Amino acid sequence: MIFKKKQFELLFYPKQIAIIGASTKVNKVGYALLKNILDADYKGEVFPVNINAKQILGVKTYQNIKEINHSIDLAIIAVAAPIVPEILTDCQKKGIKAIIIISAGFKETGLISGKILEQQISNFISEHDLLVVGPNCLGIINTDPKTSLNATFARAIPPRGNIAFISQSGAIGIHALEFADKHDIGFSKFVTIGNKSALDENDFIDYLYNDIQTKVILIYLENFADGIRFREIVKRNNKINRKPIILLKSGRSESGKKAALSHTGSLAGEDGMISYFLEDCSVIRVNTMEEMFHSAMIMANQPVPKGDKLLVVTNAGGQGIMAMDSAEKYHLKVAELLEEEQHLLKTLLPPPASVKNPIDILGDATADRYRDTLRDLIKLNSFDLLLVICTPQFMTKREEILKSLKSILEKARKRNIPIAAVFPNVQDDAVMKLFDEYDLPNYEFPEQAVKALSYYSNFGKYSQTEELNPSKKLAERKYLTIKKQIDELKKAGERYFNEIQSYSLLKEFGFEIAPYAVSTNLKEALQTSKIKYPMVAKILAKGVIHKYDIGGVIVNISNKNDLIEAFSKISTCVSADRFQAVVLQSMVKNGVELIMGIKYHEGFGHAIMFGMGGTKVEILQDVIFGMAPLSKTKALQMINSIKGVKLLEGYRSQPPVNKEGLANLLLKLSYIVYNFPEISSLDLNPVFASETELLVADARIFIK
């Protein structure tokens, strides 16, 4: 179901709320929900439902939802799981469209009874187009003073801010709320989605992109509800209202996957594919909750950077060196000042100061020295990111120093230069208030700040990515020929294009194949004149996919006798009824062996693969993926990202490989996906790449 923004307002801006399962017992969820709503100074009306009590916390109660003589925007259900279907029915009959099911005891238990119960409520929700969060969730928060809603049973509520948080886990959500409250990190919206029986992360992402209160979206997930829809929502909204999404995905290890399975009822996808998928979506993937919040602190308050060159200004040399080490670790460039720029700094700073990056303005640096140094630096074009470090030495007056940065921050914002600060161990309320007032994120250690800046730099790069129009349709005649071949394979119960069939498809898209001939018997093989020695012989047989594994490939055939022996061995390595032919192919003498192809992931769609190929591909594992459709820029990025890229750039006496041509081949694979999405896998291994040629020397294709 796809809901409109106005419908979501019932969840986040309800005027009347019913709490079904409100309790008089302090240790019960139903009590905590009511108390939190009242304590948050909620602007609407609350109707607790409890069969026994007459009032709870001074609020009149009702025995059931039918007794309430008011319309209800939002119902919160906190009763035993078996009763939930009955309560849902009552809510639907009363015309309530928005519902939060706090109750646990559904599919997350792993029990068949829980799964059946959840399927029952899921069917009911779909049938009646209800807007339902949960079950098995913590609830939602909206800090907008127009409503001031805390519909959770958590203890902490964060201050108002511009960061939204979506969590699949209630426990992680509670931890996030506690952390945000402790560190004064402001939230706009907060929601836990639990078992995702109806609404999932995609629905809330779509809503939050259009929420003017939200600038950054944080997400904790154990599994993706629908990766393809996730991608469509993010890419569509990025064109209209770009916002950073910072995502933490658990289940990366094998044991983590098993835990995620038992916790959410859905197996986590392959971790590497998830990373490529998120990068394609311009989503920042972090490894820890700490990284998530550190990144959000700068993205919520500082401008998007234009590049990745980091400049550090510090009053402590050691901290500056640590920042430089972190810059290298997290793939930021160290900004280099020109000679004339360094000379300018020398006129401002004492002789012992360092005017090279990191710029060390010495331990006795005053507010004036910080201001004067940064005032001149901020005019330069030598850097994209700025880190200001101020360690608390005896003579350091950090409040004055921070005040001196106000005008610098304003100028940096106009130039799209984000600034992070490292003022360790700040305990002075006046200083902390200034950080908040200036929207300047402060970190305890340089590594934390540099890592956050690195993530922000990546987000800035994502925004510059070239888009591809993938609609390169194959000529109709060629398309129909291949489509017919695919349909015939499916009809015959086959899912595999053999080498020759694969070559036929590839040629239609402009791939060059190393010269080959197909021989069904030895006589044909000996009469083949277009294939010159040395050659390779490969088996073509029913059901044989990995030819090497059965001895179906013989290389370096140099003469007639070698060919006779090779044909004999290959033609007898399978039974006669499976044998079809021997493929003879010229041995490619020059070039780097590469692999490229297409992989389909049920959750995320098609990805294009590129890397070092040949028979050792599984050992080397030097491959990279990019989600289809690719842009030319992305294709070149992939080529330059593999470990073996130096072999492509000319190694020792070898000339460089034609990278532009390689990028075009990757785009052709993207076009194949566009024309034939039924392809589940396509492997080209090896592809021989040289300065003048790009030759495919083996291929196989699988159909869904």
Image (cartoon, rainbow, N blue to C red):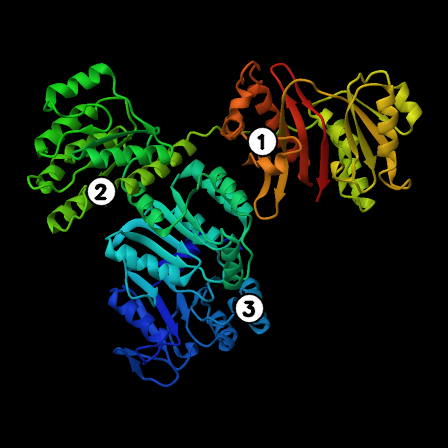
The type of residue carrying mark 3 is Gly
> Which residue lies under the disc numbered 3?
110
Residue occupying the point 26% across, 51% down: 185
Between circles 3 and 2, the one closer to the viewer is 3
Tell me which label, 3 or 1, sits earlier in the chain: 3
Q: Find the residue positioned furthest to the right.
A: 523
| Circle 2 crowding by C-alpha within 10 Å: few under 14, some 14–19, many from 20 | some
Identify the element where label 2 is drawn.
Answer: loop
Q: Residue 42: percent from the left, percent from the top?
A: 27, 64
Residue for badge 2 = 439
Q: 460 above or below 99?
A: above
Q: Residue furthest bottom?
A: 52
Q: Nearer the viewer, residue 632 or 593?
A: 593
Q: Are marks 3 and 1 in contact (CB under 8 Å)?
A: no
Q: Secondary structure at mark 3?
A: loop
Q: Report, in whole angstroms, how far the alpha carbon at label 3 lies from the one at label 1.
A: 40 Å
Whether the residues at callouts 3 and 2 have beta carbons within 8 Å, the answer is no
Q: Secondary structure at mark 1?
A: strand
Numbered tag placed on residue 444 in the rendering = none
Mark 1: amino acid: Gly
- What residue appears at the point 22 percent right and 43 percent down from the top-left corner? 442
On screen, residue 337 above or below 485: above
Q: Which residue is mark 1?
A: 611
